[in-house]
Structures are given as C-alpha cells and as structure tokens.
Amino acid sequence: MTTLQTTRPGPDLTSLSTPAPYCTCYPGATVWLTGLPSSGKTTVARTAAEVLRRDGRRVEVLDGDELRRTLTGDLGYSREDRHRNVERVGRVAQVLARNGVLTLVPVIAPYADSRALVRDLHRESRTAFLEIHVAAPVEVCSVRDVKGLYARRAAGEINGLTGVDDPYEEPSAPDLRIDSHTESVDRSVAVLLALLTERGLA
C-alpha cells in the first residue's frame, strides 16, 4: 500500500473565527446626496464617512466626479446619458448596500425619474435607500464654485450646467433636507447621522 504524503500545510481554519474588523451590527444602506454642483454634497458625505469609520462601520463613498472618470467615462451629459449615469452608479451602490456596506453617494442626479429608478432597485432587493437633498441656492453655489464650473459657464466655455442651463428637479419628499448654505458642515453631518440612527442604520 502506498502512503500519500504532502509537504504543503493545510489551510489555517482558525482565521475563520477571527472577529470582523468592522461593525456588522447594522444593515447596509445607500444614502444618496443630491443637489446642485458645489452645494456641499461631497463634503458632507466624506465627513460623515470619517465619523462612521471611526465607529467601525463599513463605509464607501461613491464620488460622482471620480466615477465620471472611470465607471461612466463613456457617457456624456445629454438627458439620456445623465439618466444612465445615475442608473449605473445606483446599481453599484445597491450591490454594496445589500452586502452590508453603508454607501454614501454624493451625485447630482438631476432628474426625479432617475432617482426613483434607483429607489425602486433598492426596494426590489429590500435594501434601505435614503434620499438626502443638500440644498443651496444656485447663487450661493456659483460663489463657492469649488470646481470652477460656474465660471467656465459664464465664460462660455461649457454649457449644460445643472441648475443654470440644464434643469435640476428638486426632490419633492426627500428623507432629509440639508440647507447647506445656512448650516455648518458639522451640523449637517450631525443631522444626517441622527437620521441614520433613527432608521436603525447607525
């Protein structure tokens, strides 16, 4: 009888019982922050993410500008392409959220039907979805002009800027409205985190 021998060590099964480095005591969710360019969406999202990570939460921020250079880099700014952009980002967010990740999405999403589509995707998989309107008047956003878009539009270098010569359909019934032109970032984040706690998501 031949005895089979191996010098390769078996898998270390003890690692399977190692506690997860993240808190898994809350369900995942998508928190979509919609608003005009320079309204403060990304600032609120990233600041909230820092706080949540310190509490051990699994958090991802799907930044609209970053995704425009990667996931949706083939899309333009027609109504159809803006809709497809939101749908793609929404599908990624939904997959993350239903697998336990709290996903913050600071993406303009100017059209109500696009946001409704994403909400429906989450509803179909019984995944929490919150719509947060980061509201600031276009006059304030144009002064902030974080990325220089309003200045470029004024100079005639670009067109189709949301809120100026392309429509922005404000949410009629958001889960939360943040008046970012009158509230500090810390206050805005505190209100957002309070909503997550109220909904059992943080």
Image (cartoon, rainbow, N blue to C red):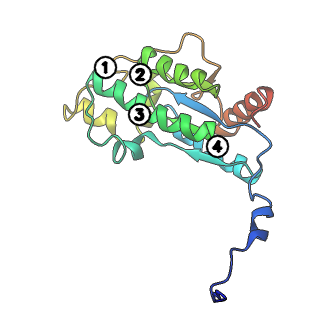
Please name the amino acid that badge 4 sits on: Val
Q: Is residue 93 above or below residue 119?
A: below
Q: Which residue is mark 3?
A: 88
Q: Nearer the viewer, mark 2 or mark 1?
A: 2
Q: Nearer the viewer, mark 4 or mark 1?
A: 4
Please name the amino acid that badge 3 sits on: Arg
**Residue at disc 1, secondary structure:** loop
Residue 8: percent from the left, percent from the top? 62, 85
**Residue at disc 3, secondary structure:** helix
Query: From this viewpoint, is residue 115 visible?
Result: yes
Q: Is residue 14 left or right of residue 99?
A: right
Q: Which residue is mark 2?
A: 110
Q: Is residue 25 left or right of residue 88?
A: right
Residue 108: numbered disc? none
Q: Which residue is mark 1?
A: 166
The reply to whether dot 2 and dot 1 touch (C-beta < 8 Å) is yes
